[in-house]
Image (cartoon, grey):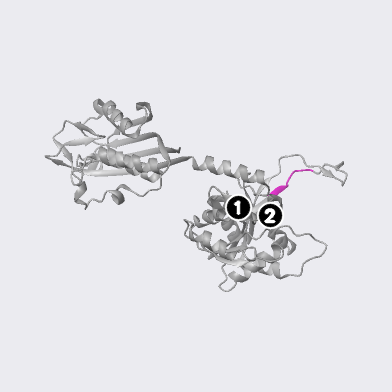
Amino acid sequence: MSVAVLIMAAGRGERMGTDRPKCFLPLAGSPLFLHSLRAFARVEEITRAVLVVPSGWEAEAERAIVEQEARLTPQVVAGGADRAASVRAGLAALAEEPPEIVAIHDGARPLVSPQLIAQTVAAAREFGAALAATPITDTLKRAGDDLLVVGTPPREGLWRAQTPQTFRFDLIQAAHERPADPASAVTDDAMLVEAMGHPVRICPSSAYNLKVTTPEDLKVAERLLSRSAAIRIGHGYDLHRLAPGRRLILGGVTIPWDQGLLGHSDGDVICHALADALLGAAALGDIGTHFPDDDPRYAGADSMVLLTQVTVMVAEAGLAPVNCDVTVLAEAPKLRPHVRAIRERLAEVLGVAVSQVSIKAKTMEGLGPVGEGQAIAAHALALLERR
């Protein structure tokens, strides 16, 4: 099924107390709506996007989109006088080539997760309509205009609606085309579908998927986003064939053995796997991108030097190693006598304590090229934090 998303960013957000529309306010260096768009771009099923903005803000939205790092490039359309009119404008843009499923999301919910998005899409496929929501856990009070309590409604079965709200396109289009009931105040799209007698499936969400409504909300979102982006983890893997006449170098340490690892450089699988883990955690590509094996400059290169250059790249990206864990797969030689020296060399390059570097060695029980003594491989995990 083709899946599209409407990012609703047409509200003025008077409670924010600024002249700019709320969804154009900066969060971690990008407009609020771009964070939502990036989350949807990480869901492979979603292939189209429409961004609905206040009339007159289309050009600024398009300029901001050019700078985004996401695979979805939305069509930008102007919204209407209220949210319902803005949704109809977005649906009209999609109707030119109607998708089968459409997710409608508040541009002011910048922390939505791709997992939650995918859950609502799956539920909409099965039930026709779905929305993200959190269960009510607080006691609710009903009060009069004088703020005196007039009742305590039961909270069992009550949920706090969020977005995305995801529907079969024909269903939500028909819901918006029905004449509005003047006695009913419609506050979200799911209500329109409910009014048609169609069931709506709830996808449990969390408070993390908050809606930015006040300046305080924006500060909370900034803190949450900073915290989630502060820790990065990466994985690296490398394997090299053993050959006679080569020095065996692992983690910058020369190990006495009658064979060494073939490679354009010195074939140090520990350094290569760890470099890839660091680059992966920092989203900086891989070791082959930065040090191509067909570049004569790196023929016979010392892999510790390459690893040092990688740590510099990571530092320039504003990140620093916290710890690393490397597993070496080798039938022989025994690495235990050399583990301490390897840890010390790696700790020196990474700029961390020896206690933050773990080296483990495993055999393959005689299985495969490694188990048959033809090769040595290494897996590495690296944890980075933003500095």
Quadrant occupied by the C terminus: top left
Q: Which mark is residue 242?
A: none
Amino acid type of the residue tagged 2 in the rendering: Gly
Q: Which mark is residue 25?
A: 1
Magenta-drawn stretch contains 158: yes
The first of marks 2 and 1 along the sequence is 2
Rendered residue at 24%/25% (across/down):
337
Amino acid type of the residue tagged 1 in the rendering: Leu
Rendered residue at 72%/59% (across/down):
191
Q: Position of residue 169 (x, y in %)?
A: 61, 67
Horizontally, residue 131 falls left or right of residue 313, namely right
The residue sitting at the left extreme is: 245
Helix, strand or loop: magenta stretch: loop
Q: Position of residue 325 (x, y in %)?
A: 36, 34
Asked whether residue 32 appears in the rendered view, the answer is yes
Q: Mark 2 near mark 1, Cβ–Cβ under 8 Å? A: yes
Q: Which residues lie in the magenta part?
A: 154-160
